[in-house]
Image (cartoon, rainbow, N blue to C red):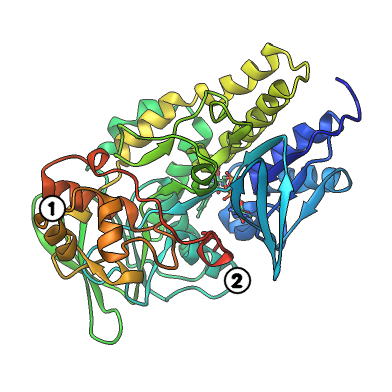
Amino acid sequence: MEPNRDEKVIVVGAGPAGLRAAEVLTGVRLKPVLIDAGTAPGGRPGRLGRLGQARLGDRDASLRRAFAGLAEKLDYRPETVATGVADGHLEVRHGDEVARLPFDALILATGASEVLLPFAGWSRPGVVGSSRALAELSRGRAVARRPVFVGTGPMLYRVAARHAANGVTPAAVLDTGPKGGILRASHHLATDWMVFADLLGDLAALRFRRVPLRRGVRPLAVMGEDTIEALHCRDEAGEEFAVPCDAIVTGFGWRPDDRLAALAGARFAPTEADGGWRAVLEDTGGVTGAPIYLAGAARGQGAILPVAEASGTIAAFAALIDLGYPVTVGTLRFWMTRIETRRLLNKGLAQAFPLPLDIALAATDDTLVCPCREITAGRLRALAGEGVADLTQAWNATGLGGGECGALHCAAAAGAILAAAHGTTPADVGRLASPTPISSENLDSP
Ligand SMILES: Cc1cc2nc3c(=O)[nH]c(=O)nc-3n(C[C@H](O)[C@H](O)[C@H](O)COP(=O)(O)OP(=O)(O)OC[C@H]3O[C@@H](n4cnc5c(N)ncnc54)[C@H](O)[C@@H]3O)c2cc1C
């Protein structure tokens, strides 16, 4: 490789994907700028510490070692937020200082934000996302003594098991995934034995502590006047029941934070799986026609840490190829295979833990969907009746998604409700592009 060239490459996000991208870039003696909103590198696993780690293998330690070896070779800028992309420049803010950094290649490894689904009472104090609950636990401040865990996916069990192992008594783990779904998907899940073993380990640990585990559950309403007293639910057979608890931890999965890609002009298209809108990318994560690459959870490759890391590595190699560096096809293929081999795992995860968007559809008219702008499910349904055809028109009419959170949390649910009111699919009501500027207030950092 040619040494000491001076192309300007910027990586946004010092999580697993961004760190691995930076590692590749320093390997050809580039000195990338590494921007991160946090005070220390490591991204989500770094912030959650040991509690956020898999049972098997300490990849966080391996990342810390990687960063220690890189620190001198990077222009690392912590506590800096990337707020926009325009004319080949990245706009950043550090405290009150703003700057425009030119780039020849830009790697966006900005992670994902939690999916929140509206059911009666979901936005009350005491209902928290799993990531925040785990972050509080890692700081020694559990969100409650007897929380109920509701949602779906291996992470739900991980977060509940970590609470159970750290002095908290989970009232129950209520999975919205279909009954028998884990068993039916087990041949796919077992294609990644570490992920599967982790899941089985968490399930066993919860059973050992006699935590009630139920699948096929739908949360209906948070009960209690001033404090949370129970979660009212329905099971697959239509039976209603209440689980007494003092807090509710939700974990419905993650949506890529691809706002910078949108600002950079990337094209978006709806996904078949859940109707969510994703940037249209090349296999390597590249945005067609622009020197911009998405990596890790920001491109939907973040559910599993080694995949997020491989995704960052691939984005960096793709950037180097486009800059004219002699990267061999075999190198790129090697890393891409590490992601492709997990196709069956992803199939199993989708089968056992599908996103229960029907929760949003069942939200009663008075349920808040966009708490920032106080827009209810009923208001969205009424908008459809008034001829509001898509989410952009809904935003124009009500300010939907224009609040503090930047539509990170409400877009999926609002799209599903508006689409259902029109008798169409979420893909038909378009993508909600929030006008809220990116800031440290609306990054999903626990
Ligand atoms: C509760 C929980 C437990 C988990 N446990 C496991 C596990 O046991 N095993 C496993 O394999 N995986 C686990 N994961 C998944 C793992 O966290 C992801 O694979 C990984 O974090 C994805 O890495 P990433 O680099 O893509 O994103 P992240 O780790 O989220 O890093 C993104 C970084 O980008 C920064 N950023 C974002 N936007 C901006 C901006 N505009 N300006 C500046 N900086 C920005 C953020 O501050 C952050 O540091 C867990 C996830 C969660 C939520």
Residue 167's tag is none
The one nearer the camera, 40 or 291, is 291
The answer to whether residue 295 is visible is yes
* Residue 419 sits above or below residue 141 on the image: above
Residue 10 image-quadrant placement: top right
Residue positioned most to the front: 87
- Image quarter of the N terminus: top right
* Residue 116 sits above or below residue 25 on the image: below
* Residue 145 sits above or below residue 187 on the image: below
Residue 220 in percent (x, y) is at: 18, 63
Q: SS at mark 2?
A: loop
Dot 2: within a 10 Å radius of its alpha carbon, few (fewer than 14), some, or many (20 or more) residues? few
- Image quarter of the C terminus: bottom right
The amino acid on which the numbered mark 1 sits, given as a three-letter code, is: Gly
Residue 136 in percent (x, y) is at: 53, 70
The amino acid on which the numbered mark 2 sits, given as a three-letter code, is: Arg
Q: Earlier in the sequence, mark 1 or mark 2?
A: 2
Q: Which residue is mark 2?
A: 139
Residue 323 image-quadrant placement: top right
| CA distance separating discs 1 and 2 | 48 Å
Residue at 26% of width from left, 53% of height from top? 393
Residue at 68% of width from left, 28% of height from top? 319
Dot 1: within a 10 Å radius of its alpha carbon, few (fewer than 14), some, or many (20 or more) residues? few
Residue 362 image-quadrant placement: bottom left
Q: Which residue is mark 1?
A: 387
Residue 60 in percent (x, y) is at: 68, 48
* Residue 125 sits above or below residue 254 on the image: below
